[in-house]
């Protein structure tokens, strides 16, 4: 521990132990506890390193006038200290342990009602219960009773913490019992006695806990439903975590009560009960005695006559990914039943579901509860599509037809559902929620086998949705996504007629000018995604990109996207820029000549980068140039790209958005990698004469010098040096990493004086000032004859020059790379940005300052000191 922290900690303890003390910011106490936890994890004893902590515990325990947050902190700290056997012994000897964790002590002081204190009590106990001595204390002090009482606490936070604590206690008892049972004959009498006592303690705790769980599961009053739900959640947690034999004992204790709850068919308990049954079913092997009873309970849950309950149970089974052909097939039928009833399309065999359930579900669907039932059905279709064919009640193309029919119903078209449930039509018509769930289901079904034959029908319906004036923007987005998914898996678009293509073109044109920006945004995103779909066969039998086949290619999409660059909404501008990059990628890869339209786009993008007030669009511009440079078959042969890069780099350096600057560094990294590609390793048996070696080295130096000058001319080096002193740490870190990469590449080989004088001009003297701060050199940069960075041995690294725009600095690239301690800079930048100001010492000082200000009699409201927590 830092010496300064050791010196100031007693003062902090005095502040926290003071009568009536409190802090304006409770999180400082949590951070202080985190620091103490970190110390203990290194193997250091807290009481040895900080003896004053024992006085703090004693003072707070015997003088219960501190604020609830400090009392809660004290309880957690006591648990942390007592987690080690030595610390536990000290706390026990000074009578602090029994007082701090005695609920009656806090009840008599009138403090137990505060949830903050109860949370501290629970978490402190949980921390301390790490060894058999702590368990003995827990048992002898009778703390199991108050812990059980807190399982259904009025505060959900307290109840949840108590559930976790009880699970922790049972797992500890399980582990200590197994250790005790593994004793050897060589153990002495005292050790055997201790093991026997530990086993008795564990057995007593386990028995009380299981009896309590069983008692709580018995449903007496409807008002106690929330408590039953909490207990069922705890039971699920235990079933997942405990091992045999405790698992068997737990099930044997509670299975009768669980079965009683299942037979009572309480809808509010369906999901938590299903979680319990599924947890037990997943943990038991077939040779376990309770396995058959759990199987019967599972069958009961999945065959209830309440439609809502049985649908929720079936969905829970599919989510659990447990495999049982009978149950899985039954759940698939149950979940498809609402779709069968609503659309009138037969998805199930006549005898595949109980007629009583069909009748009840039909009646249920005629009420407003139909929304949840239909949506649960639709959201589970992706799971159903993954099932084995023998678990499906019908071919998947029939499910596609049913979903299409439901989407038509949502638009008021009942022609395809004449046999469906008429009573539900009025509820689903115009429902955007049902439409979105249907679109998601349709997207999932696109990957199903033998459904491609339905592509024209799917295409027609989705295009109609895109053309509907009343379609919600979120539904439009789902329609576009479904269209992309179906086109993406299709190998043949020859079935799409010219009329359907015209309908799609009309829809895209209309939505690109929609009054709602979300619709425009989805449209330009669709154009970008469509451009990325792989080529497929057309009606003429030739391979073409879907964008060309359906929309006419760039001649249609580029003008639309170019127009979207002027959109008033920044999200749309950003999406259009990304879509342009996706659309033009293929022509870049093929090395096609730039059109006049593409030249105009580049001009517009540079305007956006320099003038747009929103960061989204500016980030998209830099990513556009990254995509262009990455995709271009020969970047150096594209004059417009070569001319644009220096502008993009200089504007990226001047940008205030840190993400724009990071993307600019990504572009700079691409240029670095192009200039200095990884060299091929020499042949291990190659023989080279001295003259050849010298010639090869000179050629290598000349090549490096040429590449370095090229990077300087493009503005890459200037950008990296400027970003090195950027105020945003991620930007400076990335720049430092790239400069280190550059130094390792060029400096070892470029040793001659001529090579080291590669000049690079940087704007203004502020850069020199920042670099000097990095180096710790306090030399005036305006000295006669220019400024020097580094030692005299490195020569003159910086010279003053004057340009028309004002002062600038000319630096020698290699000299600066050598003189800057980039490795040290990297280690500093790798640390968190607040590692100095929010250190443990700073935290302790802030607690003292805050307590002083908080207790000052003349302090005014609003003048509290905000604790600077790390």
Image (cartoon, helix red, strand yellow):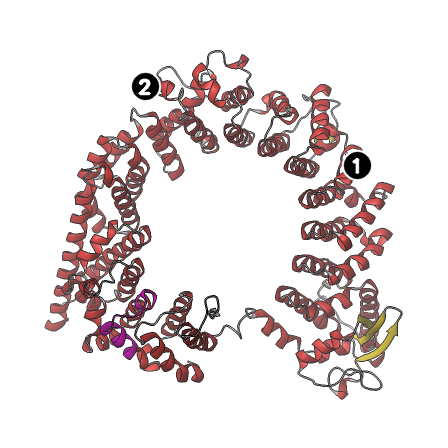
Q: Position of residue 347 (x, y in %)?
A: 44, 19
In contact (CB < 8 Å): disc 1 and disc 2: no
As rendered, which of 157 and 854 lies closer to the eye? 854
682 and 289: which is toward the camera: 289
Task: Say the numbered circle drawn on residue 354.
Answer: 2
Q: Is residue 434 above or below residue 150?
A: above
The stretch drawn in magenta includes residue 423? no
Q: Is residue 76 left or right of residue 615?
A: left
Query: Dot 1: what SS?
Result: helix
Q: Which residue is mark 1?
A: 559
Asked if 1 appears above or below 607 in the picture, the reply is: below
Can residue 638 be seen by looking at this rendering?
no
Q: Residues within 10 Å of mark 1 (few under 14, many from 20)?
A: some
Q: Quadrant of residue 795?
A: bottom right
Q: Where's residue 98, x and y in %? A: 19, 70
Q: Check the image and name the residue furthest to the right.
A: 804
- Camera-near label (1 vs 2) is 1
Residue 539 picture location, percent across and down:
73, 22
C-alpha distance separating marks 1 and 2: 58 Å
Residue depicted at x 48% and y 76%: 842
Where residue 43 is drawn, which disc sits there? none
Q: State yes or no: residue 67 in magenta.
A: yes
Q: Residue at x 75, y 48 (%)?
A: 631
Identify the magenta region.
Answer: 54-72
Q: Residues within 10 Å of mark 2 (few under 14, many from 20)?
A: few
Seen at 76% across and 87% down, the residue is: 793
Quadrant the N terminus occupies: bottom left
Q: In the visual, does 381 lie left or right of 707?
A: left
Main secondary structure type of the part rendered in magenta: helix
């Amino acid at each position: 521990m830092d010496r300064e922290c050791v010196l100031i900690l007693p003062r902090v303890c005095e502040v926290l132990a003071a009568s009536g003390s409190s802090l304006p910011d409770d999180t400082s106490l949590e951070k202080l506890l985190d620091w103490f936890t970190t110390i203990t994890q290194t193997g250091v004893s807290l009481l040895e390193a900080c003896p004053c902590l024992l006085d703090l515990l004693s003072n707070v325990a015997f003088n219960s006038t501190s604020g609830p947050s400090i009392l809660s902190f004290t309880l957690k700290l006591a648990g942390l200290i007592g987690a080690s056997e030595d610390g536990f012994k000290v706390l026990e000897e000074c009578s602090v342990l029994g007082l701090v964790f005695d609920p009656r002590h806090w009840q008599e002081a009138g403090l137990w009602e505060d949830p903050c204190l109860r949370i501290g009590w629970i978490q402190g106990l949980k921390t301390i219960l790490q060894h058999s001595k702590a368990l003995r204390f827990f048992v002898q002090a009778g703390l199991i009773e108050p812990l059980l009482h807190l399982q259904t606490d009025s505060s959900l936070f307290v109840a949840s913490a108590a559930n976790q604590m009880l699970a922790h206690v049972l797992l500890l008892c399980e582990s200590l019992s197994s250790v005790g049972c593994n004793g050897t004959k060589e153990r002495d009498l005292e050790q055997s006695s201790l093991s026997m006592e530990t086993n008795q303690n564990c057995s007593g705790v386990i028995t009380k806990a299981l009896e309590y769980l069983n008692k709580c599961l018995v449903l007496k009053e409807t008002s106690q439903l929330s408590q039953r739900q909490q207990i069922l959640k705890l039971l699920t947690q235990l079933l997942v975590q405990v091992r045999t034999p405790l698992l068997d004992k737990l099930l044997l204790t509670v299975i009768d009560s669980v079965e009683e709850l299942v037979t009572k068919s309480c809808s509010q308990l369906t999901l938590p009960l299903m979680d319990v049954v599924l947890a037990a079913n997943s943990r038991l092997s077939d040779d376990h005695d309770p396995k058959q009873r759990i199987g019967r309970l599972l069958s009961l849950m999945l065959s209830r006559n309440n439609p809502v309950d049985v649908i929720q149970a079936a969905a829970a089974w599919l989510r659990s990914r447990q495999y049982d052909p009978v149950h899985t097939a039954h759940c698939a039928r149950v979940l498809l039943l609402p779709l069968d009833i609503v659309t009138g399309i037969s998805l199930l065999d006549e005898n595949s579901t109980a007629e009583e359930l069909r009748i009840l579900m039909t009646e249920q669907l005629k009420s407003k509860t139909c929304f949840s039932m239909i949506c649960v059905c639709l959201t589970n279709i992706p799971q159903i599509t993954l099932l084995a064919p023998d678990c499906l009640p019908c071919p998947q193309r029939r499910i596609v037809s049913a979903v299409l029919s439901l989407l038509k119903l949502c638009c008021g078209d009942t022609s395809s559902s004449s046999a469906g449930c008429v009573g539900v039509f009025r509820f689903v018509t115009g429902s955007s929620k049902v439409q979105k769930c249907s679109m998601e289901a349709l997207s999932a079904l696109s990957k199903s086998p033998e459904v491609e034959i339905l592509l024209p029908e799917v295409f027609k319906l989705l295009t109609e949705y895109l053309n509907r004036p009343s379609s919600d923007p979120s539904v439009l987005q789902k329609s576009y996504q479904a269209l992309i998914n179906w086109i993406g898996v299709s190998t043949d678009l020859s079935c799409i007629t010219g009329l359907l293509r015209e309908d799609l073109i009309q829809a895209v044109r209309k939505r690109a000018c929609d009054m709602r920006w979300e619709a425009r945004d989805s449209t330009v995103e669709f154009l970008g995604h469509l451009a990325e779909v792989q080529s497929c066969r057309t009606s003429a039998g030739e391979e073409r990109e879907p964008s060309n086949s359906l929309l006419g290619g760039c001649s249609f999409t580029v003008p639309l996207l170019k127009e979207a660059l002027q959109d008033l909404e920044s999200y749309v501008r950003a999406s259009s820029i990304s879509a342009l990059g996706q659309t033009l990628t293929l022509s870049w890869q093929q090395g096609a000549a730039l059109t006049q339209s593409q030249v105009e786009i580049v001009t517009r993008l540079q305007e956006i980068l320099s003038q747009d007030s929103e960061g989204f669009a500016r980030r998209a511009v830099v990513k556009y140039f990254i995509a262009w440079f990455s995709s271009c078959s020969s970047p150096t042969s594209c004059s417009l790209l070569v001319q644009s890069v220096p502008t993009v780099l200089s504007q990226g350096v001047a940008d205030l958005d840190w993400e724009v600057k990071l993307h600019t560094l990504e572009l700079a990294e691409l240029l670095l990698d192009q200039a200095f590609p990884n060299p091929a390793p020499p042949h291990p048996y190659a023989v080279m004469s001295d003259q050849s070696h010298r010639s090869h080295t000179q050629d290598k130096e000349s090549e490096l010098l040429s590449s370095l000058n090229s990077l300087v001319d493009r503005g890459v080096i200037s950008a990296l040096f400027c970003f090195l002193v950027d105020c945003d740490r991620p930007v400076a870190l990335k720049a430092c990493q790239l400069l280190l990469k550059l130094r390792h590449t060029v400096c070892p080989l470029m040793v001659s004086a001529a090579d080291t004088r590669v000049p690079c001009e940087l704007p203004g003297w502020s850069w020199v000032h920042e670099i000097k701060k990095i180096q710790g050199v306090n030399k005036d940069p305006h000295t006669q004859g220019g400024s020097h960075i580094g030692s005299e041995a490195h020569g003159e690294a910086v010279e003053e020059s004057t340009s028309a725009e004002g002062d600038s600095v000319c630096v020698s690239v290699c000299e600066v790379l050598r003189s800057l301690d980039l490795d040290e800079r990297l280690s500093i930048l790798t640390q968190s940005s607040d590692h100095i100001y929010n250190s443990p010492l700073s935290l302790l000082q802030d607690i003292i300052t805050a307590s002083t200000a908080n207790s000052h009699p003349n302090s005014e409201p609003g003048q509290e000191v905000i604790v600077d927590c790390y």
